[in-house]
Amino acid sequence: MTTFNEPSAREVLAFISDNIERWDQCASFNSLDSTLSPSTLFDRYSCGTAACIAGWTVLLAGYQVDAYNRVHLNGNLVTRYGRPAYVREMAQELLGLTDYQANKLFIWCGTLESIKSVIDEYSRNLYPGKDHPKEDK
């Protein structure tokens, strides 16, 4: 059973709200400045980095974009303490989401308001430990 990590989700939401120009729900990581070198492009402190909610979840948790991805601007792998991980899987783990919850938050949300609404829904524990709301029956 997974437990939703509301404090982390709210931290990421607050960061995105305060840095809206650095939010891009269409990509794990993206460059806002084509003049940045690959070695600094995906630094969480770089104003040249834009990311989706999953991307910011892992960056704010201390993960870095994998060196291969820095060169190829792919952004699907991150590392921390030498441990490689896929952005979506690590963000799902860090936020304590089921597969269904992760899909809803990472894929189906297209606006900041929809992300906030889903986080509020998960905070109310509407579907505790369930992969899909229909399983409540």
Image: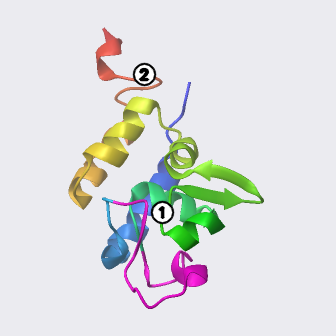
Residue at (77% x, 60% y) in the render: 81
Q: Is residue 49 visible?
A: yes
Residue 70, given in percent of the width and then of the height, sits at: 56, 71
Does residue 8 appear left or right of residue 114 in this picture?
right
Q: Mark 2 sits on what residue?
A: 130
Please, what is the three-letter code of the amino acid marked with disc 1?
A: Asn
Packing grade of label 1 (10 A; few <14, some 14-19, many >=20) is some
Label 2: which secondary element: loop
Quadrant of residue 19 in the image? Answer: bottom left
Q: Main secondary structure of the magenta part?
A: loop
Quadrant position of the C terminus in the picture:
top left
Q: Which of marks 2 and 1 precedes in the sequence? A: 1
Please determine whether, in this image, residue 72 is positioned above or below residue 48.
above
Q: Mark 1 sits on what residue?
A: 74
Segment tinted magenta in the rendering: 27-49
Residue at (32% x, 39% y) in the render: 104
Please, what is the three-letter code of the amino acid marked with disc 2?
A: Lys
Decide which of 131, 69 is in the foreground and name it: 69
Quadrant of residue 122 in the image? Answer: top left
Outermost residue to the front: 72
- Whole-angstrom CA distance, mark 1 to mark 2, is 32 Å
Picture disc at residue 7: none
Q: Is residue 65 visible?
A: no
Decide which of 135, 121 is in the foreground and name it: 135
Quadrant position of the N terminus in the picture:
top right
Outermost residue to the right: 81
Residue at (29% x, 53% y) in the render: 116
Say if the magenta span includes residue 8: no
